[in-house]
Image: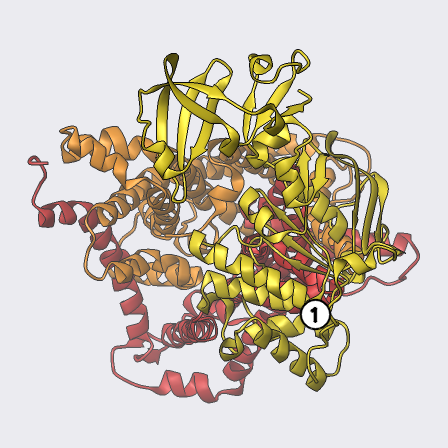
Amino acid sequence: MLDKALDILGWLVVLFILGPLIVIIGGSFTETPYVAFPPAGFTLRWYEQLLHRGDFLQSFLISIVLAVLCSLCAMALGVAAVIGLHRHGVTGQRLFRAFLMSPLVLPTIVTGVALLQFYYLIDMDAPLTGLLIGHILITIPYVCRTVGAGLVGLDPALEEAAGSLGAGGLRILFRVTLPAIAPSIMAAMIFVFITSFDQATVSIFLAGPDVMPLPVRIYTYIDFAVDPMVAAVSTLLIIFAFGLIALLQKVLGLDRAMGTGV
Amino acid sequence: MLLRLPTMRAPETTSTTQPSLAVAGIQLQYGGVAALQGIDLEVASGEFVALLGPSGCGKTSLLRTIAGFVHPQQGAVRLNGRDVAGLAPRHRNIGIVFQSYALFPHMSVLQNVLFGLECRGIPKSAATQRARDAIGLVGLSAFADRRPKQLSGGQQQRVALARAIVIEPDLLLLDEPLGALDKQLRVQMQTELKALQRRLGVTALFVTHDQEEAMSMADRIVVMRDGKIAQIDTPESLFAAPNSAWVCEFVGAGNLLRGDAASILPGAPPGSVVQVPFDKLRVSPAANGMPITGRRFLGAMVELQMATPGGIVCAHLSPAAASAFTIGTHVHLHADPADCRVLPH
Amino acid sequence: MNTQMPRRAALALYLGPVTLFYLVFLVAPYAMVLRLSVFRFSAMQLYIPQFTLANYTAVLTDPFYLALMARTIGLGVLVTVISLLLGYPLALKIARAGPRLKSLLIAITLSPLLINLLVRTYAWLVLLGDTGVVNKWLQALGLTTAPLPLGGNMFAVVVGLVHVSLPLMALSLIGVLERIDAALVDAADSLGASRARILRKIILPLSLPGIGAGSLLVFTFTISAFITPSLLGGNRVSTISTVIYEKFTFSANWPVGATLVMALLVINAAVIALHGRLFREA
């Protein structure tokens, strides 16, 4: 009885999670000027309309550029940090790790406000750089977490063996350590890309009228109209996300990719 | 109130009544793989029976079938005459000692032992008294408020036992109960477990892959192989008269002489295997014989090993008699036909 | 390893860049914002750098701000509880499922995390509006005649936040539930425990660390959420986050905004500390 009830509730929750996304995907093909589900008729005109929206296309490109740059920078800073911690235990190591993870604990909106104020005070007027810094800041913890977990799982004897065979520090790093944790690095990279690409809260504060990442563009758009064109954008983004999930699954396995542990 | 100890029920007196546990025609398949193929077994009340076999032989599957965790495709399980095949484990009144002990980590020793009594709706004070008695019975009164993590492996094992017997089960199942203990403790626990089982008079069935353990504790041993029962017998008869070469080898009941069996036992059917107990194989020096390849001191006796074309054979000699032999000595082997048994291959 | 650099130099090389980055773009901006909270507000020049506790007095005594904080914390508690009640059966289901169903369910559960927050919020906007999908269905089925006020209110905000929070909660729970030894359930079963008793006495207590971790995650996420309340609340639901946004943008009262930032950080820290106290053993 109880098991049955819990089981049914579990399925309802699955429906609750997926339902809205299904409605959006279905609604993006509707012929009505509002999102209807099941869709009334079938048309691709909302997708077509999207092609003529230069602002959405530009925002999409900005988001991609931002996500790629952010992945590279966050990886460089984050991987160096966790490898440093892994190789040379520092006194107060736990505290430093907590410091590295802090952007994850601090409210994103506060980080956005703080950077906004900071840029204002130092008179910085470069929205793209400003956005990039914000994105790097909030994605470094993901790198530390995923790559850190990979390093924890690394057999220390591997590096010791390389050392005993005469390899120097740099050679060990590039020939042994980094290749051994390559899957974690790949997973972290995808993770950072998604996080940056989807980031809205920080971006809302830092975006300018000419440099508007896609989430901010959608935010400002749906504040004034809820038409099926956004459903079309959303559908494309859902497909994009599932592509990335599949990639993540292939690279590392989902449950491991989502696993925690610094 | 004392833990109600049933008066000693000697196994032999129950032979006229129905068996405590009766298993008949069990067929169990996991995803197309047959785990149990037609198991029939009866256990008398108060009897202590071992399920012995190599890993994968189905002994744990049989235990889990009796407990009710798995449901066989065919066959019946009766407990004291009651058909329990359709019952969930919680309605079977079977006490189980798990291999990992499965003690609830968030409960104290007392709470662990109380759990089964609470499930039965026994009033708190009576239940607590019974739980304390059971904990006393396994000698852990001083540890009643500890958490399982704060106990040694042997102590955890006793808690698991107390938890299983306090519910006064119709049947006690033990899954490799001593497997996680070190050798010395294991031998001590074997004696204790056996004594406790006799004192409570509870019918018990335990799974083990260790033939010494089975021999030292069980009234009867069920030897299992490939989902079937190979032989059921008392330890003594099993040792003296294994019904197949495989059982003989598995329980270590002596040498198996193949091929040249006829030379030792005239009249043995061709292709048969001859069982010769280790202490009945005689050795005499002979320059044209086979060399001794190994020599082990076993305490009361010395084991000599010889490589024959049919495999390694062993002879157990007294230390005095063995002093004449060293590795490399060439010997002849003999056996009195009266000490040899022909086994089907 | 004679070619290795001196330890100090190596460390500086590894940890230097990220430390510098954090100091400049995290520590300094936070310090600056928090400093604003003790400055005097000025309608003409945004703020006057003069020490005052007036902003704190205002936030801690003004009924508007007190109600705001109470509402935000209440929202956090509500969303956490609902996420737990919905996430637990889902996590149980996933933990008990066979390997194939399990990976499918995990993918479904996690997928919202990888789908743009705006998309998810937009979906609820479409579903819950006065002329939205749900109201259309209800009317088509003849259950209601006039549209129910589903959107642009607290209800919509709670639904949206629960939808976003569920994966976080489920994820925390799946981890602990999977680590519960199956033999414990068998043992309880053999001792005569019903399914309900096993759930209450064995599984629930043993999954407390996951409940704690998931609740912490969901609560801190919810009280600082901005996009979801701002869009689904239809400008009628204010939380600390939406007011912070407003203070730093339209109304440009930075000192009070900074004080609310402080309030949000303090609530966050308090909840983290509380969690640490409750789950120290685990």
Snapshot quadrant of residue B125: bottom right
Q: At 26% from the left edge and 56% from the top edge, which residue is drawn? A: C22
Nearest the eye: B193 or B70: B193
Q: Is residue C170 above or below residue B328?
A: below
Q: Quadrant of the C terminus of chain B?
A: top right
Amino acid type of the residue that numbered disc 1 sits on in the rendered structure: Gly
Q: At 64% from the left edge and 54% from the top edge, which residue is drawn? A: B174
Q: Do we see residue C29 in this rendering? A: yes
The red-coloured chain is labelled C
Specify few, some or many for label 1: CA neighbours under 10 Å numbering under 14, 14-19, or 20 or more: many
Which colour denotes chain A? orange
Nearest the eye: B207 or C180: B207
Q: At 46% from the left edge and 20% from the top edge, which residue is drawn? A: B333
Q: At 66% from the left edge and 24% from the top edge, which residue is drawn? A: B343
The residue pinned by badge 1 equals B116
Please state the horizontal and vertical placement of residue B213, each as a whole percent of the image.
55, 48
Nearest the eye: C220 or B141: B141
Which colour denotes chain B? yellow
Chain letter of mark 1 equals B
Please state the horizontal and vertical placement of residue B274, each as a whole percent of the image.
61, 22
Please state the horizontal and vertical placement of residue B159, each as a whole percent of the image.
57, 67
Q: Do we see residue B58 in this rendering? A: no
